[in-house]
Image: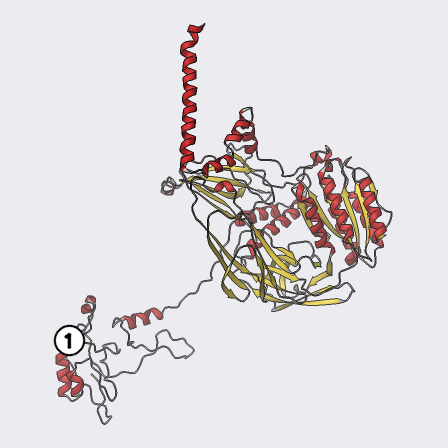
Amino acid sequence: VETLSGGGARAPPVPVPHGGLRARGGGRAQAVEAARAAGRVAPAAAARGDGARARRGRRAAAPRRADGLRGRLRPRRRRHPRRAQLPALRVRPPRPARAHPAADEGDRPGRRLRARHGRRHPARALVAALHHAQPRVRRQARRAHGRTGAEVTVGRMSYNTQVTEVEDQTMENTMKGILKPHMFCLTIPQVEGGADIVATVRWSQKLHYDNGRFTVDIPFRFPYYVNPLPKVFMKREKIQLTVNSGFSKEVLLQGTSHSLKEKARQGDKLSFLHEAVVENWSNKDFTFSYSVYSGDLSGGIHVQPSISQDYDDRDTFSIFILPGSGNRKVFKKAVVFVVDTSGSMKGKPLENVKNAVSTALSELVQGDYFNIITFNEELHSFSSCLEKVNEKAIASANDWMNANFVAEGGTDIMHPLNEAMALLSSAHDALPQIFLMTDGSVDDEHDICQTVKNELLSRGSKSPRISTFGLGLYCNHYFLRMVASIGKGHFDAALETGSIESRILKWFRKASNTIVANISIDATGHLNDFEVDSEYIPDISTQCPLCISGKYQGKFPETVVATGYLADMTEISIELKVQHITDMPLDNIFAAQQIALLTAKAWLSADKQLERKVIKLSIENSVLSEYTSMVVLQTNLDAAQKVKQKPKGRTGANEPLRFQLHGLKLGFGDKAATRENLLTAFGDEKPLEMLKIFKKAGGCCSRVADCLCCMCCIKACNRMNDQCAILLAQVCAALSCLGCYECCAEVCCGGSES
């Protein structure tokens, strides 16, 4: 035991026999008496025990152990039973502090080994130091990949979708899917009464952009028949929303359909929560909109290391440029509408296209030029040259469309497309644009793509922008997407008759309001490899931000400059800051866009390697493609554990059943249907299951069932009080007794009367 005397001189150490100071307090009295005899401990401190501290002066020093660490003098503290097994603490003279054994070779001081004053095990300091000597390996966090699909659990049966390679089309277990842009139908073969149904659906969708505002619309409407009728009980609805804008600017909340409480805000990341207890489920969709403050053109680049080594080991990048809220001048435009008027467009499709073109003409301004070309087996044009926009010309164009928009004949796309490019060759002071709308597939689609590419190479920056629009399922959507990608235009499609007009107008506004053209990005000088998914970088429009993705190898600089030309032909430079993203899976975000563009390239080049790349990308991100199929796995949860315990290589009846879903792909067009002028196919048909139900329910008894078993009748019965319900039951019982009596009388007494 070492203390300081009143004069400050250091006394020599006093040897104490082995065991004189034990872990559980044994022999402490003898050690204190020995120290008192040597004059090393103050009488007042000794009277209060070996663990007491003097009220005045310096504290009494704690004893040192065999390893040089200081012990603690706490005689009355209860010790852990295992501490009796520790070796006895020997009192030794003070030793200099030892350096940490893990000190590096750079002569930097290591940590000292010393006991803490907290309530810890006497040997924990040394153990902690030994653990600290081992180097810590910090692993990179793996990004979570959200796989799209559906998973439904009904009782002890589980059904989940999975994307696989294309399987045998003659598979016995098949299901009919529905191809509609806002609907996914999955049929459950059997549902037992009283079983709990748990459904989980994951999907990805694009944000809408309008006047600087981003909007997301999530379906959150539940039909009225999901509410149990016999008893009304309270339900709990919950919405968790996380916004990661990706912009290093302030995010402003613009509106929401449900009341949201902001939980957290950190830079460009926001978190919201909605919780409510309601009687009925929600009858309106969830809508949320926000904006990012941007006074002028601004953007950035997101880069992320690739985590997939299967189809491409290059890193991923995305470039985005916002048009801003500034009043940038829009390019003057020379517009040519090329409309398919073949026999398959008969009816509502052609009528909706005519209404959309008429509205688009009314949105042109003074200084623009336009023309209209219709095609089937022949070609008809509104004028032999480009017409200036004025009220008289627009009125004449509407009259001409009413007379010439007649659906008849076949489909020929090459001739009208060449005619439109020839008309636009004389447009020198305006941005030439072609808007092609068709519902058919032709044989010379590869030649058309090559013609558009040659025109782009020959005319350079003055080449016409070609935007394409597909109607229905018979047209080749990947051909139209490829033409738009080569022509620096936009592609869209309508798979429902009711959405044709609205989608055409949105597509036209997005492509026609150009503020920056001929964009180039100076990044190739710093990178070993730089590949954009699309063929060319499209122009910047006031109606949508520019967003492209691709792959690269190398190291991006801190800033990259994007250059382009404004409407007055002055050059503009936009500085893009590079951000290394770790909390957003870029591969998942752009998976659907990459699959569509790569499929179009594979179709054009017939490259098998591109097809394999699409297959691997589709399976990894669970996004359906033309070269993969979607199956439903039916698993018995009770037998799942038995399947796991089976030896490898053995299969049995417990293997999950596989049902293949058909009708979920667009395909590469139907040339036979186009040649036969079949009416445009849309996804408006009812499912086969619904049709079967209606056929079985048909007949003379269906009217009575509709009156007695409809939902309104059930709701009315549900609102009855107890007395009315009892009276109605008694009346029904009396009528049934009368019916039985009549039947018995006819059977028993019928023979006597005859």
For disc 1, the marked residue is: 19
Q: How many labels were placed on the picture?
A: 1
How far across and how far down the image is residue 187, in percent?
Answer: 51, 37
Q: Is residue 120 depicted above or below 687 in this figure?
A: below
Q: What is the crowding at mark 1: few (fewer than 14 residues within 10 Å), some, or many (at least 20)?
A: some
Of helix, strand and loop, which one carries label 1?
Answer: loop
Residue located 63% across and 47% down the image: 599
How far across and how far down the image is residue 495, in percent?
Answer: 65, 42
Q: In the drawing, does residue 704 fall left or right of residue 540?
A: left
Q: Depth check: give the residue in front, 702 or 157.
A: 702
How far across and how far down the image is residue 14, in percent?
Answer: 17, 85
Which quadrant holds residue 737?
Answer: top left
Q: Amino acid at mark 1?
A: Gly
Q: In the drawing, does residue 641 fall left or right of residue 609?
A: left
Q: Is residue 716 depicted above or below 329 in this figure?
A: above
Q: Depth check: give the residue in front, 230 or 503.
A: 230
Q: How is the image coloured?
A: secondary structure
| Quarter in which the N terminus is drawn | bottom left
Residue lying furthest bottom in this view?
A: 7
Q: Depth check: give the residue in front, 652 or 284.
A: 284
| Quarter in which the C terminus is drawn | top left
How far across and how far down the image is residue 480, in percent?
Answer: 70, 46
